[in-house]
Image: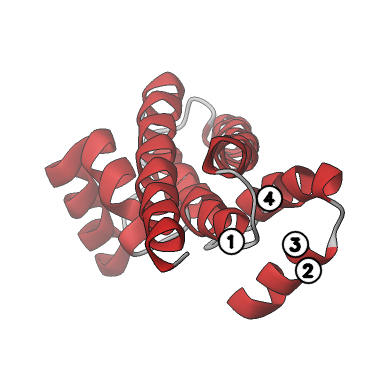
Amino acid sequence: MFEQLQSFTESLSPALQWIAVILLGVIPFVESYLGSVIGVVAGLSPFVAIPAAILGNLVSMLVAVYAAHSLRSRVRGDRPQAELSPRRAKLKARFDRYGVAGVSLLGPLVLASQITSAATISFGASRNSVIFWQSVAIVLWGVGFGGLAALGVDLAG
């Protein structure tokens, strides 16, 4: 899949490649970290590829957060929280242990930012806190992976 996305990006005109990288950033599990790598490897400047992938990932994360918050508000209303299943209770315990910051920063190791965002909202985390920490994580992961790709491309070239 990585090679297909890279080939697709390389096949576009330079003027459209940055739009393709923005769209790659929207895709769960590609996001800012792989989107920036694909953009750099496809020949885009890291100063274009990394921000483009980050932008796409931020937009998709914001959509997930606002949708999850809206859904949670409509479903839950003023009712008290129902008892959690054992599996969901285990997940909630991990969320309580690491908090929004930990889940956001470490989440990309396990889940897409869109899924992590929705899950933290479903546990009652503040929408603004989720947006802030997910944004920090998206930028750090995108810059980190994009920077490593840029170094690898420069070292190989």
Residue 39 visible (yes or no): yes
**Residue that protrudes farthest toward the top in the picture:** 128
Q: How is the image coloured?
A: secondary structure
Residue 9, numbered circle: 3
Going from N to C along the chain, the mark reached first, 1 or 2, is 2
Q: Are marks 4 and 1 in contact (CB under 8 Å)?
A: yes
Are there few (<14), some (14-19), or many (20+) residues within 10 Å of tag 4?
Answer: many
As measured in the structure, the alpha-carbon distance from the residue carrying label 2 to the one carrying label 4 is 10 Å
How far, Cα to Cα, is label 4 from label 1?
A: 8 Å
State how far apart marks 1 and 2 are (Cα).
10 Å
What count of labels does the image hold? 4
Q: Residue type at mark 4?
A: Val
Q: Are marks 2 and 3 in contact (CB under 8 Å)?
A: yes
Instruction: Confirm or deny contact between disc 3 and disc 1 (CB under 8 A).
Output: yes
Q: State how far apart marks 2 and 3 are (Cα).
A: 4 Å
Residue occupying image coordinates x 75% and y 62%: 9
What's under tag 3, amino acid-wise?
A: Thr
Decide which of 46, 128 is in the foreground and name it. Answer: 46
Relative placement, left or right, of 92 versus 118 is left
Q: Quadrant of the N terminus?
A: bottom right
Q: Amino acid at mark 2?
A: Phe
Residue receiving disc 4: 21
Label annotation for residue 116: none
**Residue on which disc 2 sits:** 8
C-alpha distance separating marks 4 and 3: 7 Å
The mark that comes first in sequence, 2 or 4, is 2
Q: Residue 17, image x and y in percent?
A: 77, 50
- Dot placed on the residue nearer the N-terminal end, 3 or 1: 3
Q: CA distance from mark 3 to mark 1?
A: 8 Å
Residue 75 lies, in percent from the top left, at 59, 39
Check disc 1 and report the residue beneath it.
38
Q: Earlier in the sequence, mark 4 or mark 3?
A: 3
